[in-house]
Image (tube, helix red, strand yellow):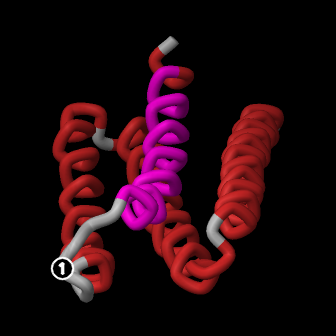
Amino acid sequence: MAGLQTEQEILVAEMKKKTGILLVFFLVMAMGGYLHAQILPLEETFIWQSYGINTVLAAIALMLLSWGMQKKKANLTVLYLLTVALKLGVYFLFFYPKFQEDGNLLRQEFFIFFTPYALGLLTEIILLARRYN
Protein backbone atom coordinates (compact mmCIF):
# COMPACT_ATOMS: atom_id res chain seq x y z
CA MET A 1 0.00 0.00 0.00
CA ALA A 2 2.90 2.35 0.74
CA GLY A 3 4.19 1.88 -2.84
CA LEU A 4 0.82 2.93 -4.26
CA GLN A 5 0.73 6.02 -2.09
CA THR A 6 4.21 6.95 -3.26
CA GLU A 7 3.14 6.59 -6.90
CA GLN A 8 0.13 8.80 -6.22
CA GLU A 9 2.34 11.39 -4.56
CA ILE A 10 4.63 11.32 -7.58
CA LEU A 11 1.68 11.83 -9.93
CA VAL A 12 0.37 14.73 -7.85
CA ALA A 13 3.83 16.34 -7.82
CA GLU A 14 4.08 15.97 -11.63
CA MET A 15 0.62 17.51 -12.11
CA LYS A 16 1.55 20.45 -9.88
CA LYS A 17 4.78 20.97 -11.81
CA LYS A 18 3.00 20.90 -15.19
CA THR A 19 0.27 23.21 -13.92
CA GLY A 20 2.92 25.62 -12.65
CA ILE A 21 4.71 25.64 -16.00
CA LEU A 22 1.46 26.30 -17.88
CA LEU A 23 0.44 29.03 -15.42
CA VAL A 24 3.76 30.83 -15.84
CA PHE A 25 3.45 30.44 -19.61
CA PHE A 26 -0.08 31.91 -19.65
CA LEU A 27 1.05 34.84 -17.48
CA VAL A 28 4.03 35.55 -19.76
CA MET A 29 1.78 35.47 -22.82
CA ALA A 30 -0.79 37.74 -21.16
CA MET A 31 1.88 40.25 -20.16
CA GLY A 32 3.38 40.12 -23.65
CA GLY A 33 -0.03 40.70 -25.22
CA TYR A 34 -0.75 43.61 -22.89
CA LEU A 35 2.60 45.29 -23.65
CA HIS A 36 2.25 44.65 -27.36
CA ALA A 37 -1.27 46.14 -27.37
CA GLN A 38 0.05 49.23 -25.59
CA ILE A 39 2.69 49.71 -28.30
CA LEU A 40 0.24 49.22 -31.19
CA PRO A 41 -3.17 50.32 -29.90
CA LEU A 42 -4.70 50.46 -33.41
CA GLU A 43 -4.06 46.74 -33.86
CA GLU A 44 -5.17 45.72 -30.35
CA THR A 45 -7.91 43.30 -31.45
CA PHE A 46 -5.65 41.48 -33.89
CA ILE A 47 -2.82 41.40 -31.34
CA TRP A 48 -5.06 39.70 -28.76
CA GLN A 49 -6.25 37.24 -31.42
CA SER A 50 -2.64 36.49 -32.29
CA TYR A 51 -1.63 35.98 -28.66
CA GLY A 52 -4.71 33.84 -28.02
CA ILE A 53 -4.12 31.59 -31.03
CA ASN A 54 -0.39 31.28 -30.35
CA THR A 55 -1.03 30.57 -26.67
CA VAL A 56 -3.43 27.74 -27.50
CA LEU A 57 -1.04 26.32 -30.12
CA ALA A 58 1.94 26.51 -27.77
CA ALA A 59 -0.07 24.93 -24.92
CA ILE A 60 -1.05 22.06 -27.23
CA ALA A 61 2.59 21.70 -28.27
CA LEU A 62 3.76 21.74 -24.63
CA MET A 63 1.24 19.06 -23.66
CA LEU A 64 2.14 16.89 -26.65
CA LEU A 65 5.85 17.24 -26.03
CA SER A 66 5.43 16.57 -22.32
CA TRP A 67 3.41 13.46 -23.10
CA GLY A 68 5.97 12.44 -25.72
CA MET A 69 8.84 12.80 -23.26
CA GLN A 70 7.11 10.37 -20.92
CA LYS A 71 5.59 7.86 -23.34
CA LYS A 72 7.05 8.16 -26.84
CA LYS A 73 10.66 9.26 -26.50
CA ALA A 74 11.58 7.59 -29.78
CA ASN A 75 8.94 9.69 -31.59
CA LEU A 76 9.66 13.02 -29.90
CA THR A 77 11.06 14.53 -33.09
CA VAL A 78 7.93 13.54 -35.01
CA LEU A 79 5.73 15.09 -32.33
CA TYR A 80 7.73 18.30 -32.45
CA LEU A 81 7.51 18.45 -36.25
CA LEU A 82 3.75 17.90 -36.02
CA THR A 83 3.42 20.89 -33.71
CA VAL A 84 5.49 23.00 -36.12
CA ALA A 85 3.29 21.88 -39.04
CA LEU A 86 0.16 22.76 -37.04
CA LYS A 87 1.50 26.25 -36.32
CA LEU A 88 2.49 26.73 -39.95
CA GLY A 89 -0.97 25.65 -41.11
CA VAL A 90 -2.65 28.09 -38.73
CA TYR A 91 -0.34 30.85 -39.93
CA PHE A 92 -1.35 30.34 -43.57
CA LEU A 93 -5.04 29.94 -42.75
CA PHE A 94 -5.44 32.84 -40.31
CA PHE A 95 -2.51 35.26 -40.32
CA TYR A 96 -1.25 35.29 -43.90
CA PRO A 97 -4.58 36.39 -45.47
CA LYS A 98 -4.87 39.20 -42.92
CA PHE A 99 -1.32 40.35 -43.61
CA GLN A 100 -1.86 40.31 -47.38
CA GLU A 101 -5.04 42.42 -47.35
CA ASP A 102 -3.09 45.53 -48.34
CA GLY A 103 -0.50 43.65 -50.39
CA ASN A 104 2.36 44.51 -48.04
CA LEU A 105 3.74 42.74 -45.02
CA LEU A 106 4.88 45.48 -42.68
CA ARG A 107 7.38 44.97 -39.88
CA GLN A 108 4.65 45.70 -37.30
CA GLU A 109 2.38 43.06 -38.84
CA PHE A 110 5.17 40.50 -38.84
CA PHE A 111 5.85 41.07 -35.14
CA ILE A 112 2.15 40.77 -34.29
CA PHE A 113 2.53 37.11 -35.29
CA PHE A 114 6.18 36.47 -34.51
CA THR A 115 6.41 37.81 -30.95
CA PRO A 116 3.81 35.45 -29.41
CA TYR A 117 5.09 32.63 -31.63
CA ALA A 118 8.63 33.21 -30.35
CA LEU A 119 7.46 33.31 -26.71
CA GLY A 120 5.71 29.97 -27.19
CA LEU A 121 8.70 28.46 -28.96
CA LEU A 122 11.06 29.68 -26.24
CA THR A 123 8.85 28.01 -23.64
CA GLU A 124 8.92 24.74 -25.59
CA ILE A 125 12.72 24.89 -25.85
CA ILE A 126 13.10 25.61 -22.13
CA LEU A 127 10.80 22.68 -21.31
CA LEU A 128 12.76 20.31 -23.52
CA ALA A 129 16.10 21.51 -22.18
CA ARG A 130 14.99 21.15 -18.55
CA ARG A 131 13.67 17.66 -19.16
CA TYR A 132 16.87 16.41 -20.75
CA ASN A 133 19.20 17.95 -18.14
Q: Give the residue displayed 25% in from the left and 84% down from the top.
A: 102
State the predominant SS element of the stretch in magenta.
Answer: helix
* Region rendered in magenta: 107-129
- Whether residue 119 is in magenta: the answer is yes
The magenta stretch spans residue 76: no
Q: Position of residue 116 (x, y in %)?
A: 51, 56
On screen, residue 46 versus residue 38, left or right, reads left
Where, by quadrant of the figure, is residue 5 drawn?
Answer: top right
Outermost residue, top side: 133
Element under label 1?
loop
**Crowd rating for badge 1 (residues with CA inside 10 Å; few <14, some 14–19, many 20+):** few
Q: Nearer the viewer, residue 111 or 133?
A: 111
Q: Residue at x 60, y 85 (%)?
A: 45
Mark 1 belongs to which amino acid?
Gly
Image quarter in which the N terminus is found: top right
Does 72 sit left or right of 40 as displayed? left
Side of 102 where 48 appears, left or right: right
* Foreground residue among 120 and 99: 99
Question: Is residue 80 visible to us here?
Answer: yes
Residue 11 in view in this figure:
no
Q: Which residue was labeled with disc 1? A: 103
Residue found at x 29% / y 41%: 72
Percent of width and height locating residue 38? 74, 66
> In the rendered view, does 23 fall on the left or right side of 81?
right
The residue closer to the viewer here, 47 or 30, is: 47
> Residue 124: percent from the left, percent from the top?
47, 40
